[in-house]
Image (cartoon, coloured by chain):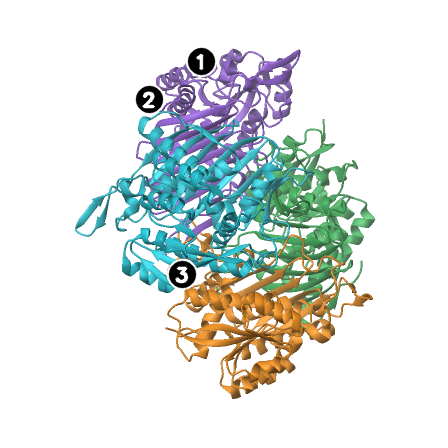
Chain colours: A green, B purple, C cyan, D orange
Amino acid sequence: MPRVVGVAVLGSGGIARAHATALRRHAEAFPEAPAVGRLVAIAGRDAARAEAAARRLGAERWTADWRALLDDSEVEVVINAGSNDIHAEPSIAALRAGRAVLCEKPLARTAAEAAPMVRAAEEAREAAMTGFNYRFVPAVLLARRLVLDGALGRVYHFRARYSDDSLLDPDAPHGWRHERGLAGSGVVGDLASHVIDLAHFLVGPITAVTAAVRTYTRTRPAPGGHRPVTVEDAVVATLEFEGGALGTLDASGMCPGRKNFLSFELNGERGTVAFNLERLNELQVYHGDGRARGLADVLVTERDHPFGGRWWPPGHILGWEHTFVHQWEEFVRRTAGAGGEMVGATFADGLASARVCDALLAAAEEGRRVAVPAP
Amino acid sequence: MPRVVGVAVLGSGGIARAHATALRRHAEAFPEAPAVGRLVAIAGRDAARAEAAARRLGAERWTADWRALLDDSEVEVVINAGSNDIHAEPSIAALRAGRAVLCEKPLARTAAEAAPMVRAAEEAREAAMTGFNYRFVPAVLLARRLVLDGALGRVYHFRARYSDDSLLDPDAPHGWRHERGLAGSGVVGDLASHVIDLAHFLVGPITAVTAAVRTYTRTRPAPGGHRPVTVEDAVVATLEFEGGALGTLDASGMCPGRKNFLSFELNGERGTVAFNLERLNELQVYHGDGRARGLADVLVTERDHPFGGRWWPPGHILGWEHTFVHQWEEFVRRTAGAGGEMVGATFADGLASARVCDALLAAAEEGRRVAVPAP
Amino acid sequence: MPRVVGVAVLGSGGIARAHATALRRHAEAFPEAPAVGRLVAIAGRDAARAEAAARRLGAERWTADWRALLDDSEVEVVINAGSNDIHAEPSIAALRAGRAVLCEKPLARTAAEAAPMVRAAEEAREAAMTGFNYRFVPAVLLARRLVLDGALGRVYHFRARYSDDSLLDPDAPHGWRHERGLAGSGVVGDLASHVIDLAHFLVGPITAVTAAVRTYTRTRPAPGGHRPVTVEDAVVATLEFEGGALGTLDASGMCPGRKNFLSFELNGERGTVAFNLERLNELQVYHGDGRARGLADVLVTERDHPFGGRWWPPGHILGWEHTFVHQWEEFVRRTAGAGGEMVGATFADGLASARVCDALLAAAEEGRRVAVPAP
Amino acid sequence: MPRVVGVAVLGSGGIARAHATALRRHAEAFPEAPAVGRLVAIAGRDAARAEAAARRLGAERWTADWRALLDDSEVEVVINAGSNDIHAEPSIAALRAGRAVLCEKPLARTAAEAAPMVRAAEEAREAAMTGFNYRFVPAVLLARRLVLDGALGRVYHFRARYSDDSLLDPDAPHGWRHERGLAGSGVVGDLASHVIDLAHFLVGPITAVTAAVRTYTRTRPAPGGHRPVTVEDAVVATLEFEGGALGTLDASGMCPGRKNFLSFELNGERGTVAFNLERLNELQVYHGDGRARGLADVLVTERDHPFGGRWWPPGHILGWEHTFVHQWEEFVRRTAGAGGEMVGATFADGLASARVCDALLAAAEEGRRVAVPAP
């Protein structure tokens, strides 16, 4: 029987729900896990919303003060699913209070804010993970294995985009995501940070960038009138990697017909892989032998695929939410000191992504190539 | 607070697990539901396997005798996820004992076996549903709405296939699915029945068929030697519909590279829709206006789509298992006498599919066009 | 220097133009050919149209009487691109007059009409080819090589369709294609005959069929009022092959959004290939090794592909018209008694396709499985 | 009857052949053209190759000295299909000698070299076109019409790539394209220049860029030993447009599985279009009305499409070579002073592309954002 660890979630929105769902799905689907999570408490800025979330998600307690979570001896794990401005302080406090922390991405609003989080994690020796859940897409994991196994040879290119239509409507209301003070950045932290993490995961460190950004919608409606948007709604960039690879990146919320279109293509001397989050069960892989050379569309649901055989028979596809379950599966192994392959993003990985985010904004601001500081 | 109904599942395999998962996911995701299910008991032929399933799926009780379920006053609903040969008797007994029944497809091994199930359902006035879960794929529901709204006009064609590779390996062991006595048929009942139900759901009654079948692997290994395969591994057919439409159908487990490839295309006088279960979040829909005419790839995850807004933001795809949740959502409304749109397959629909299955086998056997008996 | 052979084309429409273009393109692109064609004369029912076509296509002479072509000593080859009712007589006469004949598909309106054409070809010992140009699509040729090389193993299934929207408009005028007396059949001879030929080319003889047909538009406007449509606008069928494979076929002009959608998929014990004429430069081929199993999209334009290196660099795609050039290239080798691989459809192949067309119509009419007579 | 203009081609390689083919195909397919071309002479550096090309392509005369063409009174048009280093001088000389000039892309090795070509064209008042043939892909023309008609609204993004595998083999021999002195640049001039021209054609002027380049293969085999590669084999860039749009661009010959993969996606406030040269008959266009929103795959072969009805029936696809025919069709109208829509790239357009190419190389060299000089 797995040990049951008490979990508190900071946040009461959709991402909090994704994590809460993951705890339960994990407990069902991974009966051999060393530990499983049980949602104990919800913390939110607003007590009423926290209560509603707690009732809906099955938490016993709720609070409008996240510090109360750290007084709760049942809470062994804090999942930080709050807005970007409350990633650093509660995460550090929780680590210092002996809790394992799974913190949503971006780890912090800037690298400067993320750095002490990494130090706290190192000092605490508790499990600390950044919620780059797309590492846990089976097709992404398969891509990584192919790269690590040398199937692609030396990597030449990584081109990626994260496009959606979430910012197209100029009458959509102002929120914390539109405010640099709270969010740190716009699509850079929200979308590009994912892409950067996958670049690091699949290719290696990004060493330099150039970039340009735009804010197409300068103000958005708010109670009492329009408020300025102080973050970018689009970024384009070039990427240089430690190993010599070149890349492009763009992230934007201004793309009609694109909904959750995180796609990448990686070219190496012997092969190519391509992926698109809107078809997250598939990976395109180049086969170069014989006369029938081309990119094969691999449905990554078979027994010898990552997480294959865990869910349903081959061809029975998984959804977005399963990435949270897979992420939690590894996190819970970390908290339990159990073994097995570990691929999730550490806080150091979260900092590495933040450094590139900072570099993108600086490069755009200053109109020059910006080197990314080494860890 | 929704009422909690006690549920027993007959069966302990993967489909039983899909139903058990659906109960829990439903309770989380549909807090406003009139009722939610709680898994109370598992019945299986083999006591040890039933116990293991009960422990894994969280049922309190297990039994090797399904009749015991009907003595259990906590059991209000029976989900029949057993093999085809135990669909009829337990379902009829459960209905007569005042239980609602959700029975897996095919409803029975033959129409003759299914007919009394329909009568039992009519007499019992309990909710009775056939588990044609693919009706509950949001893209399929969108296709249906487009047809019902007249967006396609008169329907001319429905062509569909259900292809996988599950029967390719001649060394895969013999099982109940390979035996006509237990299964009723091979891919006809297992795969084609789904296609036929979707044909009925989207186009209307099939009135006549022609067909051919093949059994490529004549024997399969079993303890003590090979046993004969007495069902077909492939079927091809023509379909004629009441409204004048023509169709083709093929189902086979002999298709390398196809995993769960249930695809259909429907052509009407003003439009076309096309679907493929391996990309179940997508529907292709013809746009015929202006110069940019063509089939649009619609990611069926938006707020104005079936079940849109229920799960995650647009573009965040669902998995195969969500179809079971949606199916259960309607079933539980039926059991609660609640309103709302009802699209699930009744027992009569299950019988209708069985009649076409029978007609396919007869047509293949007799080498002639076989009329499908009207209900 | 290649020998120049004089060519007469019977017909003055679009297909006549495709052949005339092919002669010239061939002469440019195959400088090492043993012979090249030169368009000498056009014959058409209507003298004025024949003259216009001759002027446009660069023929020196024209005639309203095809018999005149056989008195023309410069005419060594007759390309019969007339309507179906004038395939047999002129082709036979030309062969008897010592001319090589390339006759458009379907070879004749019925097998009974096609049989004496085959005999004439045998007796004449002149080159005689049926214009099943889709054999000459490089991707189709690659598919065939894969099958012949055993890459797919034993073939289980061939499913194919030929869908377009050419018959959707009920106000489109009546023409010879709508009249059984002139055309022989509707989509059966026009579209399905192509599919059947590819089935024979890729899989082998079809031995039995079942079918259903529909005529959705019963009359069409003609000068002086509406005239009845006496041919089918849609056919669906099952196919049984000599080697045990099963297939489906459908052909229809009632498919919005489909323009020239001849697609097929062939499943064998070790692999799958799939093709679609709207993307005629591509072949999907299953790769079954390693973890990255799936259908690869092969762009069939490389040097080791059929006709690779003949036209443009890899990735520079060919158009529909190139199939006519490839076909003519083989035909001209036949007329010159030159060697090389021969894959084009003979008159016997044209008869084989006609026998299946007849069987489809008989099966639909009689509501039964119809065996296809062996050659 | 169209007037016949004498044409000389400078160059004897594959692109020279593409132009020669285009002359003939144009004469056949555009009988109403005010003029058609007749290939009169070929000039090449090497007399023997020029002679062979002339014989193959049907030119009456050949020369190893391009100046001789300008003494030939039959030559009214010069098509400059030579290597990049002989674009400027012969084109200027031909214009000054009263000949119309169609010069291959890139117009010159640098903007400095291209600028006097533009002045020569202005002074000469002869037709002068840069061979950006991809403007003449029907799907690209349709994309442009949609943009010009306002179907997409304000343009936010243009992302494009041109990927092939032409540089992957390190043992492929050294040639003029690998030498900066002769070629001016590597993939920047060879591939990116096309993308830049399409960006200008579809979106408008590029005003600033950032970039990075790589040369992965530093030397290549040549007679007598290896020679250094002095141009880049990959470039990545960000693009800023006059109207505020942001873009990315990458061009590389190091992409396994990509053959002629020039693809772009353009996002505007109301729509999206996407294109890929490997499927050049298709354009993806976003439909945003109703519930069936998504990108439609438009087969751009219909009568109301650019060049629709000119070639074959809808659905019968065109090949790469047709872009040259369409380009020539406009060029010949220009030479004849005829009217009609003119969309081809002028020499000024060629200079504009060269300015961006220069800016890319400078930006990569200097590690900064480089403004593109206004015309």
User: Is C369 on the left-hand or right-hand side of A76?
Assistant: left
Residue identifier under label 2: B373
Same chain for labels 2 and 1? Say yes or no.
Answer: yes
In the picture, residue B226 is in which quadrant? top right
Label 2 vs label 1, nearer the camera: 2
Contact between labelled residues 1 and 2, with CB atoms less than 8 Å apart: no
Query: Looking at this view, is D22 or D333 the one in front?
Result: D22
Q: Which residue is mark 1?
A: B93
Q: Is disc 2 placed on a helix, strand or loop?
A: loop
- Residue type at tag 1: Ala
> D183 above or below B140?
below
For marks 1 and 3, give the one nearer the viewer. 3
- Quarter of the figure with the C terminus of chain D: bottom right
A249 vs A94, nearest the viewer:
A249
Please give the name of the residue rendered at 49% of the width and 51% of the height, measured from the top-left corner. Answer: C328
Q: Is residue B123 left or right of residue B228?
A: left
Looking at the picture, tell me which residue is in the foreground, A11 or C299: C299
Q: CA distance from mark 2 to mark 1?
A: 27 Å
Instruction: Tell me which label, 2 or 1, sits earlier in the chain.
Output: 1
Q: Amino acid at mark 2?
A: Pro
Which residue in the protein does label 3 denote? D308
What kind of residue is marked 3? Gly
Residue C194, by quadrant, is: top left
Question: Can residue B28 be spotted in the picture?
Answer: no
